[in-house]
Image: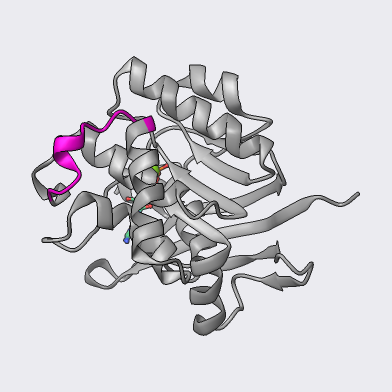
Amino acid sequence: MDDIILCVEGYAKQFYLHSRQRLIPSAAQVDLTVRAGQLTALIGPTGAGKSSVLKGIYRTYLPSAGRLIYTDAHGHKLDLALAGEHRILELRQREIGFVTQFLHCLPRQPALDVVAEPLVIRGATREAARKQAADLLERLAVPQRLWGVPPATFSGGEKQRINLARGLIARPRLLLLDEPTASLDSATTEHVITLIEEMKQDGIGMIAIFHHPALVERLADAVVALSPPVIAGALIETIA
Ligand SMILES: Nc1ncnc2c1ncn2[C@@H]1O[C@H](COP(=O)(O)OP(=O)(O)O)[C@@H](O)[C@H]1O
Ligand SMILES: [Mg+2]
C-alpha cells in the first residue's frame, strides 16, 4: 500500500539580497519522503537549510524550486509549492502542523488558551479544547500555576513545551518539528519522545530536526543529510 504522505523532489530556496544584489542560497537539491507513522529526520550543520525545508513545506515562504507532492486525507495529491493560499490555510488548520523553533503567540493569551486554540479553530468547544490542552500540559510536566499565565515571561524550556503542546494537540497528519527538545531537561525530553512514539503509532508522519544525534538514532525511520548550499561566486570574492 502506498502510505506516502509527502514526497519532496529537488527542493531549493534562495533569497535575493537587495543590498548586495545577489542570491543567497538557503537550501538546494533536497529530496525526501515522509510515510504515515514514520519520522524522517533532517540532519546537517547549522546553515545547511534544515529549517528552510520545513518553512517551504509549511509555505512560510514559496520554494524557489522543486515539487512538494502532498497526499491529503482524501487521497488527493497536490503540489504544496503551487497550491493557493486558501488551500494552504485549510491544510494548516486540518492536516499540517508546525512546531517552530520559537513560540509565536498573542501577548496576553493564557498558556492554556494558546495550546487549546488550534482545536477551537477546528470547531471544538472552548471547554473541550481547554480540557485536552490541560491533559497535554500535564503530560509535558508544565506546572499548573503557569496555565493561566501568558507564556511571554516563561523560561525557554517552558515556552518550548507550550509550543509543542500547541503543535501536537490537533493531531495533524503531517507534523513538522524544528528542534522540539533543544532547551528541555532530560526528563521532559523523555516525555516528548513518548509523545512522538505515540503519534507514530497513530499514523502521523513527521519531519523533524533534532539537536541531539541520540534522538535521531532513537526516533528516525529515515535520515536525510543536508550540506550547506554552495554560494556562487564565493570563491572569486575571497580571492579578490
Ligand atoms: N529570510 C532569510 N533571508 C536570507 N537568508 C536566509 C533567510 N532565512 C535563512 N537564510 C539563510 O539560509 C541558510 C540556511 O538557513 P536555515 O534553513 O535556518 O539553516 P539550518 O536550519 O540548517 O541551520 C542560512 O545561511 C541562513 O542565513
Ligand atoms: Mg534551523
In this rendering, is residue 136 above or below 106? above
Q: Residue at x 17, y 54 (%)?
A: 110
Relative depth, front residue between 32 and 135: 135
Q: Quadrant of residue 140?
A: top left
Residue 67 is drawn in which quadrant?
bottom right
Residue 56, x across and y down, in percent: 50, 61
Residue for point 24% across, 32% down? 157
Taking depth in this image into account, of 140 and 227 the one nearest to the observer is 140
Q: Position of residue 46 (x, y in %)?
A: 38, 36
* 156 sits to left or right of 63: left
Q: Is residue 76 above or below residue 190?
A: below
Asked if residue 151 lies left or right of residue 186, the reply is left
Q: Quadrant of ligand 2?
A: top left
The stretch of residues the image draws in magenta is 139-149
Residue 53 in view here = yes
Residue ranking furthest to the right: 1
In magenta stretch: residue 143: yes
- Please name the residue shown 48% across and 71% down the image: 62
